Amino acid sequence: MGKTAKPQRDQAAPASDIHARIAAEAAACRTAPRPSVRDAGEFPALGALLDSGRTALEQSIPTQFDHAGKTYFLRVSIGLARLMVFDTPTAYEPMACAMSGSSEEFGHTPGH
């Protein structure tokens, strides 16, 4: 029987372990001088995480709200959002930070 190869400690995270890839990409981003602009294409797993965060933010915008017994309808443009993603609820420092800008509007769709 042949010897089995020992796994190397510094191997890249397997493609199936998305959370390990996200953590590795976030760590690589944090080594850059701050503030810095990074191309999301360089860090696809981390970029997808930040996109999911932005989508969650957009989907959480209500379409209406009540004030003094009357319903009003809300439309929001986020403009420039600073996203900070934490990997645990007790983490002091964010795992990743990003600025996301858009002129898209969310919430109430006029005319409905």
Image (cartoon, grey):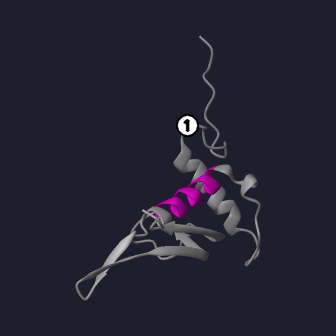
Q: Quadrant of residue 101?
A: bottom right
Near-viewer residue (63 or 40): 63
For this view, does 70 lie left or right of residue 81?
Answer: left
- The residue lying at 46 percent from left, 67 percent from top is 107
For this view, does 38 lie left or right of residue 59?
Answer: right
Q: Is residue 44 above or below residue 83?
A: above
Three-letter code, disc 1 = Ser
Q: Name the residue tied to disc 1.
A: 16
Crowding at label 1, few (<14), some or many (≥20) Cα neighbours within 10 Å? few
Residue 3 is a magenta residue:
no
- The residue lying at 70 percent from left, 54 percent from top is 43
Range of magenta residues:
45-56
Residue extending farthest front: 111
Q: Quadrant of residue 14?
A: top right
Q: Quadrant of residue 74?
A: bottom left
Near-viewer residue (100 or 8): 100
